[in-house]
Image (cartoon, rainbow, N blue to C red):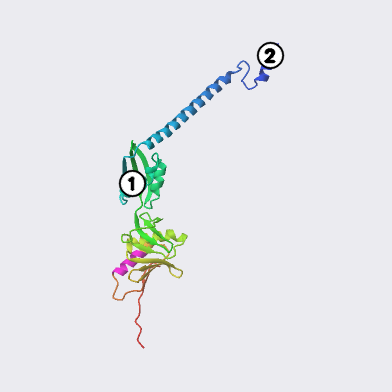
Amino acid sequence: MVAQEEVAMYRVHPHRGTPGRVGSHSSAGGESSKARTTLAIIGVALLAGAVLSARWWQQQPLRTLEFTGVELLDTAQLRHLLQQGADALPEQPSLAEWRERLLRHPLIAEATLSWRAPGTLRVHVRERRPVALVVTASGQYALDSSGALFELPSAPQGQLPIVAVPKLQEWMKGEAAAIARALRKELLQVERLHWAPQHGWVARMENGWEVLLGDTTALEAKCSRARRFLRWRGQAAPQRVDVRWSGQVVVSVPVPQPQG
């Protein structure tokens, strides 16, 4: 009879351990389930607390804006950019929305926002530093100090050297940025940069001279050679300075033709 009861018990609970320990695993499983439930409750509570805390910060009236990392930008313009349309809202925008507004400015590369105290918002920005303007037929780009091109719809024309590229194709952007950086370092009086199939990149100077650069190999050395030659040029004004190849600078000068 006892054997039949044990067989029946095992048929009903075949997963509960070995003979003599029926139900020994159920208590451990229950403790594990309780622990998971507790952790889930704690997680939900922390998440709810974070949401409520963020909402509380947003509901406080904005009294002070603290800016760090600002050197080129106007803080009044940044304040207007942040507060534009915010007065009509029942509460302050979220930090993510404010960050998105700041990143719309072409000279802001990165922005970090945090609440320092009730009503005090700290804004840290990383500025792009434009060093040259690359003007194309479809618009204009600024070249920053790292050599990257970014769109710049409007710029102070008198403060940045302009390198014009009539037809800047997608593959040319990186090369144009590198060339503009090298030109700014060595040759400041550049009026236009264009691509000629027979010569490669050609820089036209403000006085009408042309510097044949070719490809982007050894750009700084090429520009440096052209700068040294143009600084110590002779009486005959060159029309074209060829620095495409290493070695001597090849100079083309006009030859007066006899009249009649």
Name the element at disc 1: helix
Q: Amino acid at mark 2?
A: Glu
**Would residue 103 appear left or right of 15 to someone viewing this image?**
left
The foreground one among 198 and 112 is 112
**At x 31% / y 42%, what residue is drawn?**
66
The foreground one among 224 and 66 is 66
Q: Quadrant of the C terminus?
A: bottom left
The chief SS type of the magenta part is: helix
Name the element at disc 2: helix
Q: Residues within 10 Å of mark 1 (few under 14, many from 20)?
A: some
Q: Earlier in the sequence, mark 2 or mark 1?
A: 2
Residue at label 1? Answer: 79
Q: Position of residue 47 (x, y in %)?
A: 45, 32
Q: Residues within 10 Å of mark 2 (few under 14, many from 20)?
A: few
**At x 37% / y 63%, what residue is drawn?**
163
Q: Is residue 84 above or below residue 239?
A: above
Q: Quadrant of the N terminus?
A: top right
Residue at label 2? Answer: 5
Give the CA distance from mark 2 to mark 1. Answer: 82 Å
The foreground one among 101 and 137 is 101
Q: Which span of residues is magenta-colored?
A: 222-231
The foreground one among 51 and 197 is 51
Q: Is 230 contained in the magenta span?
A: yes
Eye-nearest disc, 2 or 1:
1
The quarter holding residue 218 reads bottom left
**At x 35% / y 66%, what residue is drawn?**
191
Disc marking residue 108 = none
